[in-house]
Image (tube, grey):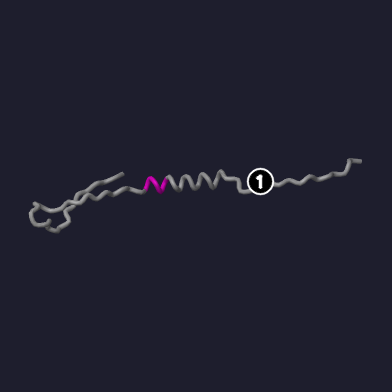
């Protein structure tokens, strides 16, 4: 899901400080969010009524 890695920047720190500066890099897996987005898109496409069906009354002649 999420991954945190520490990497050194490779640059030396300013005079007086010790060691190298470490940066945290957060890496998120976006696959679950894309899955949910497509699932919601398909759900709304299937369940939406775009136009109500129109009906028309027909006057039929009497049976003879």
Q: Residue at x 12, y 53 (%)?
A: 20
Residue at 44 percent of width and 47 percent of height: 37
* 31 w.r.t. 10: above or below: above
Q: Position of residue 30 (x, y in %)?
A: 35, 49
Residue at 11% from the left image edge and 57% from the top image edge: 14
Disc 1: CA contacts within 10 A as few (<14), some (14-19) or many (>=20): few
**What quarter of the picture does the C terminus occupy?**
top right
Residue 49 image point, x, y percent = 60, 45
Give the residue at x 50% y 47%. Answer: 42
Give the left or right position of residue 41, taking residue 20 as reference: right
Q: Is residue 6 left or right of residue 59?
A: left
- Give the magenta-colored segment's residue range: 31-35
Q: Which residue is mark 1?
A: 52
Task: Give yes or no for residue 13 being in the magenta stretch.
Answer: no
* In this rendering, position of residue 48 left or right of residue 36: right
* Quarter holding residue 32: top left
């Amino acid at each position: 899901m999420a991954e945190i890695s520490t990497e050194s920047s490779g640059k030396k720190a300013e005079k007086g400080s010790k060691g190298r500066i470490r940066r945290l890099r957060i890496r998120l897996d976006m696959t679950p969010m894309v899955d949910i987005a497509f699932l919601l898109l398909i759900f709304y496409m299937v369940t939406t009524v775009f136009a109500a069906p129109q009906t028309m009354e027909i006057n039929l002649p009497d049976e003879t």
